[in-house]
Amino acid sequence: MIKNTQQQYGLISKVIHWLVALVVFTMFGVGLWMVELDYYSTWYKDAPHYHKSVGILLTVVIIFRLVWRWFNVKPEPLKSHSRFERIAAHIAHIIIYVLLFAIFISGYLISTADGRGISVFNWFEVPSLGQFVENQEDLAGEIHELLAFGLIGLVAIHALAALKHHFFDKDSTLKRMF
Amino acid sequence: MKLTTFLLAILFSGGLLAADYKIDTKGAHASINFKIQHLGYSWLTGRFNDFSGSFSYDKAKPEDSKIQVKINTTSIDSNHAERDKHLRSGDFLNTDKFGEATFVSTKIKDKGNGKLEVVGDLTLHGVTKSITIDTTKVGEGDDPWGGYRVGFAGETEFRLKDFGIPEKLGKASQTVYLSLHVEGIRQ
């Protein structure tokens, strides 16, 4: 099934979920690695270029994901989930989205601080909106890094919670995403 | 009472010996520019946008001159935000820790023909070293707005390593060249 049902996530939701998970973890690793590269590394120019290009495309995917979520039935929480679990999971999901967008925006603000746009795989360019605060690239860079760590931390809790449902509660929480 | 008289005497005598000038950063008639080789194939130039300073100068006794300059290192500007961010990081200037660079002259030698050798202590990246700035007086005189100005141009160079700045840019890019322009307004 392409679309979600009351009981199960649909194919589109599943594919986007796992694709985003893979890309976010890869982007986190690449981000940490690329800022330590030696000037003469062959990746010195390419790694940030790909990081930025993928970031822009990921933004589009997440916007689509929110639209898809809005126009679809949302699978209901399992009856076995406690009230605390439902509320905690819901809040965590909202914060994950908020963090994602904050990371997209702060990343964009690093590279566009001097009026340069961001070239996406030399395919199209996202224009700069200019500089909003002095030394914007420094402030945006610190926020970008801190929030990335925050996101990965929260996603780790999200994943551990899913595994807890799968292995300890032995319910279908995780299976619904496959 | 005696102390006040003493201090006034010093101030007054100082004023008689040489005029005090404030570097015209407000009107931006001064600049601190740098250049460094890129890969050995071209020059990368940039500047520090925020600095202030003053000097005393008397054309009859140029060797009695003094100059001091304070530079806000976070104001480095190479016309590329991502590069400036990198230059401010721990890989280069570490501006979080060393937000200010200073230059204070220690000795000025008159080489004649408006040429001066300005020796002084440069503090950069937390390291203080003596450097020599080859200076040429460009001109001096009344300005059209009732003031009096004198201006100089200076050149100097140093190795990044001398100031404990990691050399990460390759063999051709170990020395940075500074090109300085100051115009002072007599106070």
Image: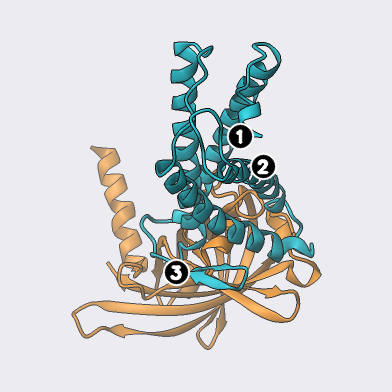
Chain colours: A cyan, B orange
Q: Quadrant of the C terminus of chain B?
A: bottom left
In x, y percent, where is residue B70?
46, 57
Looking at the image, is B49 positioned above or below residue B135? Answer: above
Q: SS for tag 1?
A: helix
**Res B101 seen here:** no
Cα–Cα gap, marks 2 and 3 = 26 Å
Q: Which residue is mark 1?
A: A152
In x, y percent, where is residue A10?
56, 40
Which quadrant of the figure has residue A164? top right
Within-10-Å neighbours for mark 3: few <14, some 14–19, many 20+: few
Q: Which residue is mark 2?
A: A25
In x, y percent, where is residue B37?
69, 75
The amino acid type of the residue labelled 1 equals Ile
Q: Are marks 2 and 1 in contact (CB under 8 Å)?
A: yes
Label located before the other in sequence (1 or 3):
3
Label located before the other in sequence (2 or 1):
2
Q: Which residue is mark 3?
A: A127
In x, y percent, where is residue A54?
61, 57
Cα–Cα gap, marks 1 and 3 = 28 Å
